[in-house]
Image (cartoon, rainbow, N blue to C red):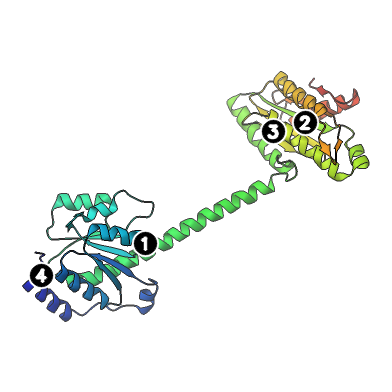
Amino acid sequence: MSSLSAPKLAAAKLQADLVEPAPRDSCAVTALMPAHILLLEPDESDARMLAGSLEKTGLSVRTVSRLAEARKQIATHKFDLVLASESLPDGSAIELLQPRTVVALPLVILSDLIVEERVRKAFAAGAMEYLLKDGSLLPLLDLRVQRLLEMQDERRILSDLFDENARLAQANQLLKELSISDPLTGVLNRRGFDEAVRREASRAERLRQELAVATFDLDNFKSINDRHGHEAGDVVLRTMGEILLAEGRTGDVMARVGGDEFAALLPSTTLMGAWKFAERVRTRVERAEPLFESTALKATVSGGAALFSESLQSSQELLSLADDRLFRAKAQGRNRIAFH
């Protein structure tokens, strides 16, 4: 028999009636929106007494007597608190906490006896509170439940704040990506590329590693727009972006830095490695011939390659040297890569 039954239960009820409840802030109570309690108590007398005490304070209480019933209720309803007798006909209240879920179950365990090992086990499993079922429980229960519900409300507010911060962080990341990306080609824009050059140049200097860059310019691109229209030119630009991404390694940075100008930043790459990369890109562009309205578009590209360690003082000098070599490739007949 539970320790709340018979004479002790009557005495507890009398004590609860005599104890004046703590003043309640009506706004705080309504902020719980609303408070639903699941009471898991196998003893009918104790269940009626506990439920009656809680309902007097305006709480909504649903009572079950077995662990299996509690699990069904928890699976189909949302409860602000679960009050459960520790010893049950079909198990222990602690089993409600196993296995742990992403959202912790707000469980308060009611026990006939305080045993340190049981208390440790309950809190280790994730219980919010552990209360003794004696004559002082009813006067205490209202105050403890009120405080636990306030704690739950605070946790929900914090959880909502964390979720909102996570959403804002994702939105900010998306905005940043949009601000440094070229929507047509899928590679970075000039702003994103400049940021990458500054970052990688600093890293290469600090770690004494090679850093190469290759710049590209589509040959006679204006004639494609004049002959077939700007939509055809967009097809060629997208093809160039796709080729750069396909030829690049993880860690390489590809960008559209002007109308028909592109660049590739190649960490841990020698000058010869940059030239070989640029040659692969040049060859693929020459062979690509993407279709626009059933017309195969022919394009070629010229490029220049440079190495950060070639007596350079800044990342801007690196790009300028690569561009100088690109212009040399143009002057030498186009559709070629210059690297010295």
Mark in front: 4 vs 1: 1
**With respect to residue 331, does 140 lie above or below?**
below
> What label sits on residue 76 in the rendered view?
1
> Which residue lies under the disc numbered 2?
215
| Kind of residue at disc 1 | Thr
> Which residue lies under the disc numbered 3?
245
> Which residue lies under the disc numbered 4?
5
Residue sitting at x 89%, y 38%: 224
Total labels drawn: 4
Secondary element type, mark 4: loop
Mark in front: 4 vs 3: 4
Secondary element type, mark 3: helix
| Kind of residue at disc 3 | Leu
Residue 73, image x, y percentages: 32, 62
Residue sitting at x 15%, y 51%: 116
| Distance CA(mark 4)–CA(mark 1) | 31 Å
| Distance CA(mark 4)–CA(mark 2) | 86 Å
Q: Quadrant of residue 319?
A: top right
| Distance CA(mark 1)–CA(mark 2) | 61 Å
| Distance CA(mark 4)–CA(mark 3) | 76 Å
Q: Considering only order in the chain, which callout, 3 or 4, is on the residue closer to the N terminus?
A: 4
**With respect to residue 308, does 112 lie above or below?**
below
Residue 325, image x, y percentages: 82, 25
Horizontally, residue 73 falls left or right of residue 299, namely left
Image quadrant for the C terminus? top right
